[in-house]
Amino acid sequence: MKILKRYAWIFGIAVLLVGCNFPGSQPAVIATPNVVETAAVLTVEAIRTQIAQGATEVDQPTLASTWTPPVETEVPTATPTEEVPATSTPWPTYTPFPTYTPYPTATATATAICNQMQFVKDITIPDSTWMRPKQTFTKIWEVKNTGSCTWDAGYSVVYGDEGGMLGASASTPLPSAPVRPGETVRIAVAFTAPDSDGVYTSVWRLKSTNGEKFGRMTVKIEADGNPDTFLFADKLCSAEWRSGAGIIPCPSEKNHANGYMFMTKEPKFENGVVDDEPTIIMHPQKVNNGELAGYFFAIKMPANPAHFRTVIGCTYGHPGCDTYMAVFYRVEGTSTAYLVGDWDVKYDGNLTYIDVDLTSKGLENKVVHFSFLVRAKGNANDDEVFFLAPRIEVP
């Protein structure tokens, strides 16, 4: 009996050892039904051997009495499924979309404007020109016909109801009619500066035969009595500039074949010296013996005897310069011009200093017009000259 109990205990330990996986032992064996059944049979066989060797009593172990051998279940072997290649269905033939044709852009048809004018430039009296009070002057505009209708003799220049009329007629016939679309024309109107100091503006327009007003032209002046020192360079466009080609715009385009003039504060002289005073640069019309003259508006001379002063010569970089230069004066209300002085100027590195005492002229308190002249001696192409700070002043 003790032997059977002892072997029953051993049998229980064996079963536990089969189901346990101790650390450090061989990898655990999964207890499939076949492995468990084999272990049980081996254990029972050992007990029988012990009984045959002398055991007379056998206690049935609890585990043996309750354990039912598992029924071995055959694990079905998966039958490989034969892979049947899928039948390839080709893509349908690609049919491209038709080429996109954009709708044509709608183009608005511009309606031609019959009466239309474009301002081109001031020929005389640019805005802010100095004037002596009561000074008479002629303003000249250059304009272009940008409309579709021709300006005929029925067109006129009329006051635009802005600013003052400055002594001008309310309406002036359009000169040089007809003016066809695309053509330019110069329009001149005579004015008189007010008798008191101030800034004055006047606006003028064109008027068609049927009464339509269009375009815009302005005149703006600064009326002021001149001081004892009068600087001609600062009043450059208070002069009317002429050559053999007619009236020259002021200031004018440099190197123009009709002659040109402008003011600079950085003159460079034929000797290479650069100055910083306001200077008038002049060039005659580019023809043999060509001329350029500037006729300044009248100035009120000082009550005390005055001098005309300047420095003259050729400008730097014009070695062919060889000219005649002169300054004239004319008392307002008379037609005769008198010489202040004249000089021959050549590109030789020398400058000419001018100081003319006007006491003997009897000009005190008189209204006087001064004019400047440059005349070429033969070919005029290189005859650019200067008047450095020309002025009327009381010593």
Image: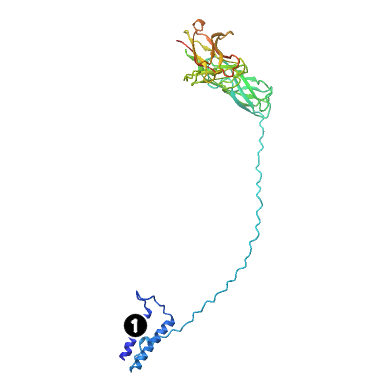
- Horizontal side, residue 25 vs residue 191: left or right: left
Query: Considering the image in quadrants, where does the N terminus appear?
Result: bottom left
Assess disc 1: are there few (<14), some (14-19) or many (≥20) residues with their C-alpha within 10 Å of its C-alpha: few
As helix, strand or loop, the secondary structure at mark 1 comes to: helix
Tell me which residue sits at (38%, 79%) in the image: 19
Please name whichever residue, 45 or 241, is drawn nearer the observer in this view of the structure. 45
x%, y% of residue 105?
65, 43
x%, y% of residue 231?
49, 15
Q: Can residue 196 be seen in this view?
A: no
Q: Is residue 29 above or below residue 298?
A: below
**The quadrant where residue 124 appears:** top right
- Type of the residue with mark 1: Ile
Which color scheme does this rendered protein use?
rainbow
- Horizontal side, residue 65 vs residue 294: left or right: left
**The quadrant where residue 289 appears:** top right
Please name whichever residue, 277 or 306, is drawn nearer the observer in this view of the structure. 277
x%, y% of residue 395?
45, 10
Q: Is residue 118 visible?
A: yes
Please name whichever residue, 291 or 376, is drawn nearer the observer in this view of the structure. 376
Q: Is residue 42 above or below residue 197?
A: below
Tell me which residue sits at (41%, 84%) in the image: 38
Q: Which residue matches tag 1?
A: 13
Please name whichever residue, 106 or 357, is drawn nearer the observer in this view of the structure. 357
- Horizontal side, residue 153 vs residue 236: left or right: right
x%, y% of residue 351?
49, 14
**The quadrant where residue 170 appears:** top right
Q: Is residue 71 above or below residue 94?
A: below
